[in-house]
Amino acid sequence: QNTPVDDAAGAANVFTNNQFGQTQDLSALAGQPLPGLKVKLAGTNTVALDAGNVALPASGNFTVIAHLDAAGTPKLSVFQNDTARTAAGQGRLVVRHTAAAPAVDVLAGGSPVFRNLTNSNEAKADLPAGTVSASVVPAGATTPVVIGPANLNVQAGSSLIVYAVGSLSGGSIPVLTEPIG
């Protein structure tokens, strides 16, 4: 998490010295193939993730995230961001499981709101704007709490995307957020 990386396509770095949690706008690359996409330790040729050839969608709103799969192996996932309008006074909460961890449930007020969320998948709901206090627990359980409780600010007319990243066995599962809209 504290190691900066370079993102390379083919022989050239596309983005350099990316810090943990930092995002990059890929819209200038929309519709282009990225041959030999690799995530390397910054300033080196040491490959942390070799994603192979990746074709970026030509249109739409997408997030590409390098993360660990459930077993702890680095992988790349592409998520299409839901940009549909929400009802007046509502916002969208999207939770994405991108941590080296088994299936989880997301609790709000102690009750499951998203069940059996597995790595590389998401769950979402349109909610009244306001603060949601959420916790993450193993699927089918109410304890132990592995994330949270965290107060999430859902804003009217926008989406708040929350990523669980890191490794359960490594004892570190931070949360990253990405507002859309």
Image: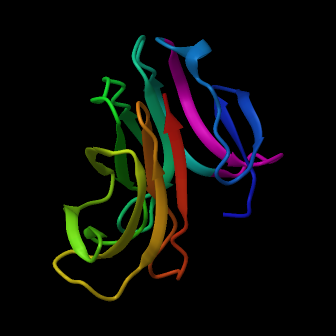
Q: Quadrant of residue 137?
A: bottom left
Residue at position x 52%, y 67% in the image? 166
Left or right: 50 as drawn, with respect to 23: left
The boundaries of the magenta stretch are: 32-47
Residue 4 picture location, percent across and down: 75, 52
Left or right: 24 as drawn, with respect to 67: right
Residue at position x 46%, y 82% in the image? 169
Residue 123 picture location, percent across and down: 26, 50
Q: How is the image coloured?
A: rainbow
User: 7 above or below 4?
Assistant: above
Left or right: 179 as drawn, with respect to 89: right
In the displayed image of the protein, which residue is found farthest to the bottom?
144
Residue 57 picture location, percent across and down: 41, 18
Q: Main secondary structure of the magenta part?
A: strand
Find out whether residue 40 is within the magenta segment. Answer: yes
Residue at position x 58%, y 23% in the image? 26
Q: Quadrant of residue 58?
A: top left
In the displayed image of the protein, which residue is found farthest to the front?
89
Q: Quadrant of residue 36?
A: top right
Q: Is residue 65 visible?
A: yes
User: 169 above or below 82?
Assistant: below
Residue 168 picture location, percent across and down: 44, 77
User: 57 above or below 130?
Assistant: above
Find out whether residue 41 is within the magenta segment. Answer: yes
Nearer-the-camera pick, 131 or 117: 131
Q: Is residue 51 visible?
A: no
Nearer-the-camera pick, 133 or 175: 133
Residue at position x 54%, y 22% in the image? 34
Nearer-the-camera pick, 116 or 76: 116
User: 177 above or below 58?
Assistant: below
